[in-house]
Image: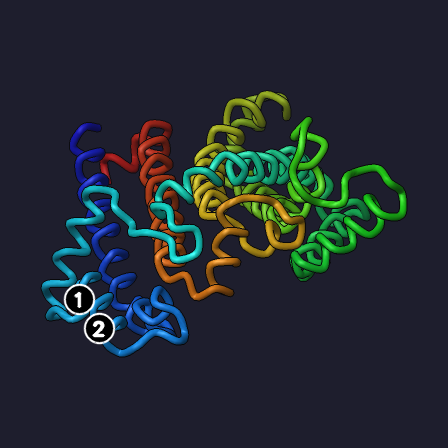
Amino acid sequence: MLRYVVNRLAWTIFDLLVILTITFALSYLLPGDPARTIAGPHASIQTITAIRHQLGLDRPLYVQYGRYLNNMVHLNLGTSLQFGTPVLQAIWARFPATLELALAGLIFEIVVGIPFGFLAALYRGRWLDRIISMISMVCLSLPQFWVGMMLLFIAAFKWNLFPLGGYGQPVIWYVILPGITLGLVGVAYYCQLIRARLLDLLERPFIQAARARGLSEAGIMFRHVLPNIVTTLITQIGMDLGYFMAGVVVVEAVFGWPGIGLQAWTGIQALDVPIIMGTVLFGAFWIVLANFVMDVLYASVDPRIRVS
């Protein structure tokens, strides 16, 4: 197990290095000049040149890349052009709100999607299965911004059941609508994933053998089916959590949720390159970390992964 963890950790570090390199290259493709943005639209050439020298933008590319990696090792993501504060500090201040939204979306898609997936599989080919499958397809095709606006219009404006976006106390009152919007697509995906996995498992020879030995359907479900589904769920939950923690721009923008995604959106509008690149790196870190943790959990649940 230790060898497997070390191997996965090495690949995780390599993935982060690749992401850092790609992010560094993309920073040169973004429109706008950071020096001119800092200096202002009416600054002289001498002022812009001085700022470029201060930022190290006039140095050779390999020197800038080495400085960039050194800054990343020391968690120095630069200074926001908008707020004048360190990027990591600005991101970390918005992190709790994004964490709350991510957990709300994850809980919603798990609590709703998994039971409906079981129902669809157990009633395969019947009217309930067809209804669940049809609703799942509709949910998969709905744009998140449209779902969010409809929920705000109906549940918050028309029925006055929830606040019209924003953030306040108690948090659960404000996070329900954005959590549903964030997790709705996941509900449909989990439903189809569980259904397909169940139907595949129930046709396997070891399930047929368990039935032949007289084991009840409940016993088959708990002893043979659920352990095989857990590994699938671990992988998917890890991917979703990493993605949500990266900051969901659309949902946070629609609901005015003060998280990392909304901050990134304002950074894009203001051409705040340090905030944009810092958010990308922060999100990539969470996605890679979530995949690493899920790989280790997957291997601990299924020893065949370690052997392979």
Q: Residue 36's quadrant in the figure?
A: bottom left
Q: Is residue 123 left or right of residue 4?
A: right
Nearer to me, 286 or 53:
53
Q: Distance between the residues labelled 2 and 1?
A: 6 Å
Instruction: Say which amino acid is labelled 1.
Output: His
Q: In this view, does 169 lie above or below 249?
A: above
Which residue is tagged 1? Answer: 53
Coloured how? rainbow
Q: In this view, does 65 lie above or below 10?
A: below
Nearer to me, 207 or 30:
30
Circles 2 and 1, Cβ within 8 Å, touching? The answer is: yes
Instruction: Say which amino acid is labelled 2.
Output: Thr
Judge the density around disc 2: few (<14), some (14-19), many (≥20) Cα neighbours within 10 Å: some
| Quadrant (top left, top right, bottom left, bottom right) of the C terminus | top left
Which residue is tagged 2? Answer: 49
Q: How many marks?
A: 2
User: Where residue 240 appears, x then y in whole percent?
Assistant: 49, 44
Judge the density around disc 1: few (<14), some (14-19), many (≥20) Cα neighbours within 10 Å: few
Instruction: State the residue at coordinates (25%, 68%).
Output: 25
Q: In this view, does 36 lie to the left or right of 71?
A: right
User: Where residue 274 appears, x then y in whole percent?
Assistant: 35, 57
Instruction: State the residue at coordinates (63%, 26%).
Output: 217
Q: Is residue 13 above or below residue 114?
A: below
User: Where residue 161 appears, x then y in whole percent?
Assistant: 84, 37
Q: Residue 138's quadrant in the figure?
A: bottom right
SS assignment at label 1: helix
